Image (cartoon, grey):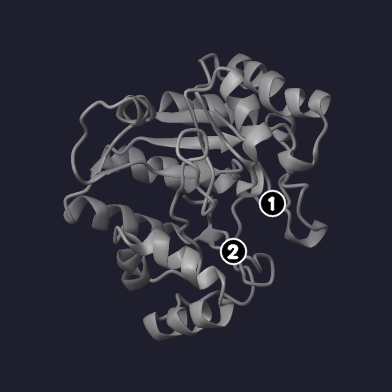
Amino acid sequence: MYHGIERVSSARDPYGMFVAPDAFRQQVEHLLEAGYVPIDETTYAAALRGADVPRKAVLITFDDGYVGVGEHAAPILVSLGVPSVLYVPAGLVGGRSDWLAARYRHPLLSAAELREVSAAGMAIGAHGFDHADLTRLGDADLRRQVVETRAELARVVGRPVRSFAFPYGAHDARVRLAVERAGYDHAFAVHDAVPGFANGRVDVNATDTLRSFRIKLHRHYPRARLATDRVPLLRRKAHDLVGRAPRVECDTHESTGGAR
């Protein structure tokens, strides 16, 4: 699971959500060189129903719909023949990441840009309407975030929207049931996985080196990640031992900075 693919300063990305384009290419190339088999959304959904897939199948996903995913990630994936899924908050298409503090907001893909990346092989999934925490909403608001969002995104991209990713990875039994009843094939959480409609993902962030990326591919990594959640200092120490990717201190170039 990725968020943005862009070279962004640590000052404007304190949460480490933006992976540099060259690092992203190295990571995807490593997947291919290590024998992983990228699959698309349809194949993933079939696997959940029991269909056979390669032992090292991998699905690449992006949350939020940042402009850099279209500018940098999509061309890299096309050049390597790798499919992916992009999860978008329908009410913020063409806007900015307004759920963050103003100084940390970044541009999101427009409707036309979403159609372009969709045509290039990137499936579009739902990520709520405005990136709200769905566990805090009443029934009417939840319907808007889940049902109306799906219809709006399908209208924008001209294709069915088949899957959902919970904003912030937050979900509970009521939210999962609402997503399932809305007709999605499956849904993604992040670390707090529940089989069925809250499948887990491995997050890749700005501080990951190729070495830490390889560690995250290990099948026991999700379990270890959950264990270290209880001891955050231990997780930080472990990451320090593995190494952290350097961050730029100031933005030398942001392809869309100030454009919207």
Res 126 → quadrant:
top right
Q: Nearer the viewer, residue 225 or 117?
A: 225
**Furthest residue toward front:** 173
> In which quadrant is the C terminus drawn?
top right
Residue behind mark 1: 106
In screen coordinates, is 159 left or right of 40? right
In this view of the protein, can residue 197 be seen by the observer? yes
Q: Nearer the viewer, residue 173 or 217?
A: 173
**Residue 208: percent from left, percent from top:** 43, 69
Residue behind mark 2: 8
Instruction: Please name the residue shown 43% across and 23% down the image.
Output: 119
Residue 239 vs 2, above or below: the answer is: below
Count of numbered labels shown in the rendering: 2
Give, as a three-letter code, the residue at label 1.
Answer: His
Give, as a three-letter code, the residue at label 2.
Answer: Val
Helix, strand or loop under label 2: loop
Q: Between disc 1 and disc 2, whose residue precedes?
A: 2
Res 143 → quadrant:
top right
Numbered tag placed on residue 64 in the rendering:
none
Instruction: Please name the residue shown 72% across and 29% down the image.
Output: 145
Instruction: Please name the residue shown 47% across and 56% down the image.
Output: 203
In this view of the protein, can residue 23 be seen by the observer? no
* Disc 1 crowd, CA 10 A, few/some/many (<14, 14-19, 20+): many
In space, the residues marked 1 and 2 are separated at their CA atoms by: 10 Å
